[in-house]
Image (spheres, rainbow, N blue to C red):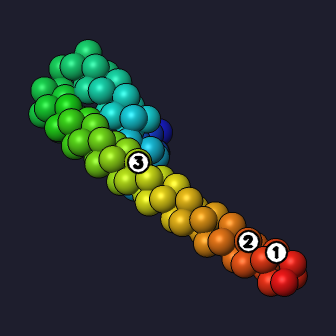
Amino acid sequence: MRDERLEMADRQSCSNMKTKLPGPTKTNLFLEAAKLAEMEGLDVAKADFKGQAKEAGKQAVRISEKLGAQRESIDGGLEIMAAVATARFRNLVLRSQS
C-alpha cells in the first residue's frame, strides 16, 4: 500500500513537472530523476528522464527567445508611444503660444 502511494505521488509530481515548472527547473529535476533511476538500476526510466530533460531544455530556450522578442517589441512600441506623446505635447504648446 505504501509503495502504491509513493508511486502515485511520483507520477503526480512528474505530471506537474511536465506542465507547470519553468524550463530550467524542469530540466534539472529530470536530470536528478535520471540519476536516481540509475542508482535504482532502472535503465529505461533513466533514458526516459534524460529525454524529458533534453526536451525541457529545448523548451526553455524557445521560451527565452520568445520572451526576448516580446521585450524588444514592447520596448519599440514604448519608444513610438513616447515619440507620439512628445509630438502631441509640442503641438499643444505651439497652439497655446499662438
**96 is higher (above) or lower (below) than 56:** below
Label 1: which secondary element:
helix
- Residue 78 placement, left or right of 69: right
Task: Tell me the residue at 46%/46% (across/down).
Answer: 21
**2 is higher (above) or lower (below) than 43:** below
- Residue 44 placement, left or right of 17: left
Q: How many marks?
A: 3
Label 2: which secondary element:
helix
What type is the residue that disc 2 sits on?
Arg
Q: Please tell me the numbered disc located at residue 93.
A: 1
Instruction: Point out residue 53 in the picture as x, y percentages from the top left corner.
Output: 26, 35
Figure quadrant of residue 24: top left
Q: Do the CB atoms of the residues marked 3 and 2 lie less than 8 Å apart?
A: no
> Real-space Cα distance between discs 3 and 1?
37 Å
Name the one closer to the observer, 56 or 95. 95
Task: Tell me the residue at 37%/45% (across/down).
Answer: 64
What type is the residue that disc 3 sits on?
Gly
**26 is higher (above) or lower (below) than 70:** above
Q: Earlier in the sequence, mark 3 or mark 2?
A: 3
Q: Do the CB atoms of the residues marked 2 and 1 lie less than 8 Å apart?
A: yes
Task: Tell me the residue at 64%/64% (across/down).
Answer: 82
**67 is higher (above) or lower (below) than 94:** above
Visible in this render: residue 98? yes
Q: Please tell me the numbered disc located at residue 90.
A: 2
Name the one closer to the observer, 35 or 19. 19
